[in-house]
Amino acid sequence: MEDLRLAAGRCGQHLRTELGQDLLDVDDQAQRLIAIVSQKGKVDGAVGGWLAGAPAPRATVEKLLARLTEPAIAVAAWRDLVDACRTSGISADDLGSRRDLFRSLLSNAEINLRITGRILAGVLHDSAAFVTEARVHIGDLDRDDVATWPGLDEAAGLDEAARLVLCEQLIASRAHGGHHVVWLAFGQAHIGTSYFAVGPVTFYCAPMMQAMIGVTGPGKEWVPAELRRTDGWLRLKDIPNDDGLVFARVDLGHGRFADPIRRATDLAHATVAVAKFDTGTRNWTPWSGYIHAVDGRVTGMPLFSAPKPEPEVVPHEDPTGDVLEDLSVTLGARLSPVPEELHEVINLVRWWQEAGEQSNLPRVVLDVRVVEWVASLVGGGKWYEFLTCTWKQQWVRSRVRAHLFDTCIEAAGEPHAVAPEHRAQMTSLRGKLQVHHGRGAYTSHLDHALAALPALRSMHPVHTRTSRRLTTLADRLATTATLEEWCSQLELDWALQVDRLQRLRNALAHGGPASSDAVDTVASFGRDLARVTLRVTLTGLLDGRGSVTAHEEIKTAAEAWRAGIPLAPDVATALFA
């Protein structure tokens, strides 16, 4: 409910006005539920009364959800995004929230983000080709009536107001959709016949797939329509003929799909997963690439290719050997014999590493299990209470420092984005921010990043992503008071993420509601917390301080840093003293 209220509060004025009372009603229901569950003792009866009350909470929420697919709502969110882009007073975070909300609204309305986003960007750049494409989409032009399609670099000659009007018309339009078909490929696979269907998914051996391309004429109607036409993207030479390759044709039917590729991929992969669940094999490896056809015409075809191994660090740049050498002093002396506590931590390190190979859904459960074990080891009570008590201020501190360095190092690495007279200075600044020592080792200088912030901000043009991030960072670090305000906001973010992580972990472990999209919002948060708590535990055991003392020192130092911010004479002292 707190997440819901936060999201509602971040809506821009146009969207809030368009949603009107429907948004206020949901917010009111959220406040009522929060008040009920905040009471001491059992609240089952009160919750039941709330659910049965009038207006019915479920109907109130469903009404809002239905409205979120309306064209007028997407247009309102677009106007909020445009307003945010027009002024430099909106922070990078708020602008990002409006962008993400706009994208989500389009996706929920089953509007293809890739296609619509490409056209919107082209219209805003006054590209005649994309202006024509937009007019075809909204019905002002018939595609077959366009005798000569404009070039991508040809200007349409529209002023900004006209371009924005066309963008709104495109967003408000709702195409009737089409018949979508997606082809995917699986390697290390085999079927015993030319083809067979499992519902809407038809599997073809590679020779059969290749033999059908371009086949037309009487009696060939069994060949899929998109393969009979060769006037589009489809070319025989682009179809791989590797041994052990099976193609899957996913017929999504007629409709409008925000992401037909993802929908088809989920369906095909789930179908194969059910079969592999019975056989227990590790074959049938998904390939990248696909063929996407609408109404019998291929509209997109990234080339098929076998999966590539994860990129590895070049051996002579890998610092693992240096770390192993350092462990000869700390770890070596404790391996004969290995203490039980250290043995458990080392096993847990392997657990954490193996969890990293999983998708976010199981990984969240495994990462929280790591934190649970650490909390029990140091006597921190429940894992989420342990995190907030011991690690909250350290997380706030690390977020501030990471954001400072990451923003500045990114800005200093974009010489192409600034005027030529600034490029030499930018190169010099980057060399001060990060010093390379060889073998994958770097030293990052946060004090130089803070000193370089004004210069970097002055170099980058206004109304670029980097400039807005620099401006937002400079505003937050203007005084110790603004730094204090930023830290307070991060504390609120911490509480929301810990609560959400707890809710979703419990849902995953006990069969509650937990969508993959929701889990994605906390996956890296939980992963990082598991890593740092485990690292401090291991370090404390290796250097002899013990795990309890190691965590207590982290807590004490971070809380002292946080308490010293209002008392510091300047921001540099507050950050680094």
Image (cartoon, helix red, strand yellow):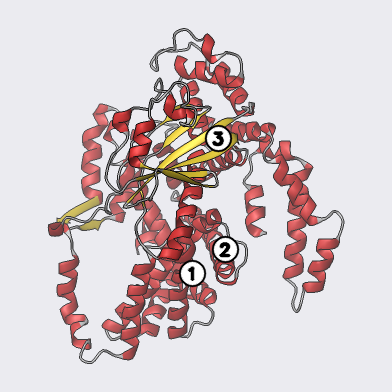
Q: Residue furthest top?
A: 147
In primary-sequence order, the first of circles 3 and 1 is 3
Residue 190 in picture, x, y percent from top left: 35, 51
Spatial distance from mark 2 to mark 1, Cα to Cα?
A: 13 Å
Label 1 packing within 10 angstroms: few (<14), some (14-19), many (20+): many
User: Residue drawn 40% across and 84% down?
Assistant: 548
Whether residue 414 is visible = yes
Spatial distance from mark 3 to mark 1, Cα to Cα?
A: 38 Å
Residue 171 in picture, x, y percent from top left: 60, 28
User: Residue drawn 73% across and 52% down?
Assistant: 27
In primary-sequence order, the first of circles 2 and 1 is 1
Pick the quarter of the image with the N terminus. Answer: bottom right
Q: Name the residue that disc number 2 marks.
A: 500
Q: Name the residue that disc number 3 marks.
A: 84
User: Residue drawn 37% across and 83% down?
Assistant: 547
Work out whether residue 181 or residue 25 is closer to the camera in this orientation and state it: 181
Q: Name the residue that disc number 1 marks.
A: 365
Residue 533 in picture, x, y percent from top left: 40, 73
Q: Secondary structure at mark 1?
A: helix
Give the amino acid type for the residue marked by disc 3 in the picture: Ala
Looking at the rendered image, the disc whose residue lies closer to the viewer, 3 or 2, is 2
Compared with residue 357, is residue 336 higher up or lower down, i.e. above or below? below
Pick the quarter of the image with the C terminus. Answer: bottom left
Judge left or right: residue 507 versus residue 55.
Answer: left
